[in-house]
Image (cartoon, rainbow, N blue to C red):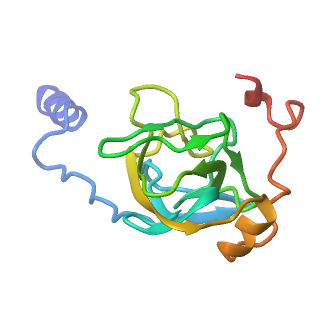
């Protein structure tokens, strides 16, 4: 009798065939907790919109290039570079994150009759990442310029793109964001 009881306990502890595996849970949608979006799984951020749009032809001049992601991003991570099939526009070194925490803006200038191509997160390390520090999927953008005379100032570029005043992006405060200094 003792041997049978012991064997039953061992069988139970070893996960005998009498035990069924727990049911798999369906994927959970993201939800917001205290202003922070929580994702059930670690889907990498994806580019959802750019200005200019892929393949768009626009007048040369001052360009406020925008890249919008599907998740809130950290302001200190970015990776953009030249892409295949075009030149890299002449841009400032560092993009800025807007208050929606999903859109980066980069001030650039373009010349007439040119093909431009950029990549985002094409290098293997660092780059655009969400607030959980999950790296965004690589993406690319190609557009062209026409012979039209485009914006020659930031206010003109904002007006041409129908953008609100984006001169007040999130400012990096190392005391508020300890990882900002990385």
Taking the view exactly as shown, the residue that stands out farthest to the top is 182
Q: Nearer the viewer, residue 54 or 16?
A: 54
Q: Residue at x 44, y 55 (%)?
A: 46
Q: Residue at x 58, y 41 (%)?
A: 90
Residue 2 against residue 153 in the figure, above or below: above
Q: Residue at x 30, y 46 (%)?
A: 85
Percent from the top left, x then y, of residue 45? 47, 51
Q: Is residue 84 left or right of residue 77?
A: left
- Horizontally, residue 10 falls left or right of residue 81, namely left
- Give the residue at x 44% y 68%: 57
Depth check: give the residue in front, 157 or 14. 157
Q: Viewer-proximal residue, 10 or 154?
A: 154
Count of numbered marks: 0
Q: Position of residue 78 (x, y in %)?
A: 58, 37
> Where is residue 112 shown, x and y percent of the image?
50, 57
| Residue 63 quadrant | bottom right
Q: Position of residue 80 (x, y in %)?
A: 50, 38
Q: Quadrant of residue 28?
A: bottom left
Q: Quadrant of the N terminus?
A: top left
């Amino acid at each position: 009798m003792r041997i049978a009881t012991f064997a039953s306990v061992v069988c139970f502890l070893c996960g005998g065939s009498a035990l069924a595996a727990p049911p798999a849970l369906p994927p959970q949608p993201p939800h917001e907790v205290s202003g922070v979006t929580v994702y059930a799984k670690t889907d990498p951020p994806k580019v959802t919109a750019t200005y200019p749009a892929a393949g768009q032809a626009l007048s040369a001049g001052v360009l406020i290039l925008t890249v919008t992601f599907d998740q809130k991003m950290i302001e200190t991570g970015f990776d953009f570079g030249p892409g295949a099939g075009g030149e890299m526009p002449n841009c400032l070194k560092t993009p800025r994150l807007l208050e929606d925490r999903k859109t980066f803006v980069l001030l650039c200038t373009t010349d007439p009759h040119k093909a431009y191509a950029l990549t985002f997160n094409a290098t293997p390390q660092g780059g655009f990442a969400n607030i959980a520090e999950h790296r965004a999927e690589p993406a690319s953008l190609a557009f062209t310029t026409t012979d039209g005379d485009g914006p020659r100032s930031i206010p003109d570029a904002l007006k041409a793109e129908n953008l609100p005043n984006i001169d007040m992006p999130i400012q990096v405060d190392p005391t508020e964001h300890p990882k900002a200094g990385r």
